[in-house]
Amino acid sequence: MRDYMAKSWTGPIVDNHFHLNRNGRFLDAAADFSRVGGTGLVLVHCPNFASPPNGFEAHRESYLDTISMAESVQGKFGLEMRVVLGPHPAAFAHELEKALHSQDGEAQEYAISNYWDSIEAALELVKQGRANAIGEVGRPHWKVSDEVWDLSNQLLKKTMKIANENNVSLQLHVEGESDETYPELALFADQVGLDRSKLIRHYAPANVSDKNTHGIIPSVLCGKGSVEEIITSHDSNSTGFFMETDYMDDLKRPGAVLGPKTVPKRVKQLFEMGISEEILYSSHQDLLVKAYGQPLEF
C-alpha cells in the first residue's frame, strides 16, 4: 500500500524508449536522466538513416555499437540497461518505397532481404543474452502507396510470427491516433499465435484503458496532458503501461522528441496526483521483467 506520509516518489523510474548517439550528447544525456531520479533505460537502436547497414554482418556491427553504448551508461551511472534492436520502419520502408517505385525486381528483393538480415541479426543477439527484445519494428506512419502498406503489413505479421516462435517481445512503431491501429495489431498477433502482451506500442497515446489498447502494452509518450489522461484511464488497464520520451539525442534537434528529464518528472507528478505505489512499481519494475527479462549484465 502507498505510504501517504511520503511526499515524493523514490522508487524505480525507467524510460522505455530512449536513443543515444555517440555524436550527440551521449553520456551527458544519460547523466541528466540519472540526476533527476532515473534508474533504468530501455535503449532502442537508432540506425544511420543517411546510410543504413546492408547485410547481416553490417546490421550486427551496428547493433553491437548500441550494446556498447548501453554498457558505457551502465558502467558510468549504474543505471539498469535493457536494449532493443531492430529495423526502424523509416529505414526499411523508405528503401522499400524506392525499390517499388523503380519497378526493379532485384531492388525489391534486396530491400526485403535486407529487412530479414536486420531481424536475424537482432534475434541472434537477443538469444545470446546481449539484448532484450526486437524493435522498433512496424509499418510506415506516413502516407504510402497501397503496395508499400500491404507489404509492410506482411513483413510485420511475419515478424510477429518469428517473435512467437522465439518467445521474444516486439517494440512497435506504427501510425498515431487511428482507432483501427490497436485492434488491427491485436488481430495480427492472434493470427500468428503471439500473446498480445508480447507487443509493446512505442509512442502510444496516453489512454491506457483495456478498451483502447486491446491487450497490447502501451508505452506512453509523456508529453503535455499525458499525466492527466493516464490518471483518468489507468483504473481500466490490466496490462500495465510504460512511459517514454523517444529522446533522439540529435544535436540538430535538442530535446526531441522529449528531453531526458521528462519521464522522472512525469512519474513524480503521477505519484503526487495519487496514483498508487503498486502501479508505479509495476510499470517501472515488474512489467519490465515480464516484457524484457532482467537488465543486461556486461
Image (cartoon, rainbow, N blue to C red):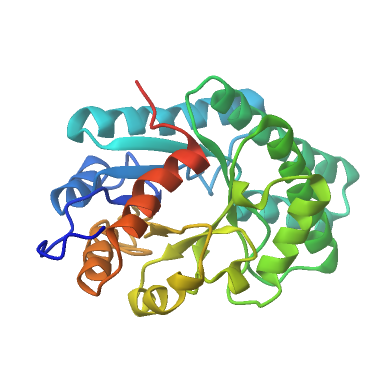
Residue 121 is at least partly visible in this image: yes
163 to the left or right of 147? left
161 to the left or right of 256? right
Judging depth in this view, the residue of 56 and 288 nearest the camera is 288
Expressed as whole percent of the image width and height from the top left, the position of residue 82 reads 41, 36
Residue furthest out toward the front: 1
Expressed as whole percent of the image width and height from the top left, the position of residue 93 reads 69, 54
Quarter in which the N terminus is drawn? bottom left
Expressed as whole percent of the image width and height from the top left, the position of residue 173 reads 58, 57
- Please tell me in which quadrant of the rendered image residue 294 appears: top left
Judging depth in this view, the residue of 83 and 292 nearest the camera is 292
Determine the residue positioned at 47% across, 34% down. 293
- Please tell me in which quadrant of the rendered image residue 179 appears: bottom right
46 to the left or right of 110? left
Quick check: 62 above or below 271? above
Expressed as whole percent of the image width and height from the top left, the position of residue 22 reads 32, 39
- Please tell me in which quadrant of the rendered image residue 9 appears: bottom left
Quarter in which the C terminus is drawn? top left
143 to the left or right of 278? right
Judging depth in this view, the residue of 14 and 260 nearest the camera is 14
Figure label count: 0
Quick check: 241 above or below 298? below
Quick check: 151 above or below 42? below
Residue 152 is at least partly visible in this image: no
Determine the residue positioned at 67% across, 49% down. 92
